[in-house]
Image (spheres, rainbow, N blue to C red):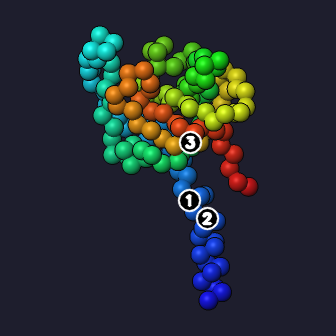
Amino acid sequence: MHRSIIIIFLLFIATPCLSQSKITWQTLSKVQFTDKYSEEVEAYYYYPHFGNAVKAMDGKEVYLKGYMLLMDPEKGFYILSRNPFSACFFCGNSGPESIVELKLKPNHPKFKMDQVVTIKGKLKLNRDDVYQCSYILLEAEPYIPDK
């Protein structure tokens, strides 16, 4: 009986560690985009068609390493990018799959432009909101692995 209680306790403790998954920019590249017209903004936007590997991560807690882009810190608008600011997708080096919008938790640390960080959060796939990125990390915060 004591042994089963210990096993259950260890599983309970280990579950949060196992629930986090490292994702890579290569995984996030498993998406294709088509032009779709939005009557709301009266323009075309890139409509994402996510691959199976990406769909499997939707709603899961993940962590990802990249460059921090301070788009509008006063309004809480931060982006994690595969590339530094000067080589981001809007400068011609990549596509919208190379950035992740961050919804940072309150009281997060201050970041510097192009600071290399690892961020964890709950991955949200965005298909239809033209005002947000295709990838969003909710409840995002710096990831510091257990030692």
Tell me which residue sits at (65%, 18%) in the image: 74
Q: Residues within 10 Å of mark 3 (few under 14, many from 20)?
A: many
Tell me which residue sits at (42%, 20%) in the image: 131
Query: Left or right of 34: which side holds 15?
Result: right
Q: Choose top left, top right, bottom left or bottom right for residue 109.
A: top right
Tell me which residue sits at (33%, 46%) in the image: 52
- Which residue in the protein does label 3 denote? 121
| Amino acid type, callout 2 | Ala
Q: Earlier in the sequence, mark 3 or mark 2?
A: 2
Q: Quadrant of the N terminus?
A: bottom right
Q: Choose top left, top right, bottom left or bottom right for residue 107.
A: top right
Query: Left or right of 51: which side holds 133?
Result: right
Q: Is residue 54 visible in this depiction of the protein?
A: yes
Q: Residues within 10 Å of mark 2 (few under 14, many from 20)?
A: few
Label drawn at residue 18: 1
| Amino acid type, callout 3 | Gly
Cα–Cα span, label 3 and label 2: 18 Å
Q: Judging from the image, what secondary structure is the residue with disc 1 in?
A: helix
56 shown above or below 124: below
Q: Residues within 10 Å of mark 1 (few under 14, many from 20)?
A: few
x and y, in percent, of residue 110 in the image: 73, 27
40 shown above or below 76: above
x and y, in percent, of residue 47 in the image: 31, 26
Cα–Cα span, label 2 and label 1: 6 Å
Residues at circles 2 and 1 in contact by the CB criterion of under 8 Å = yes
x and y, in percent, of residue 51 in the image: 33, 41
- Which residue in the protein does label 2 denote? 14
Residues at circles 1 and 3 in contact by the CB criterion of under 8 Å = no
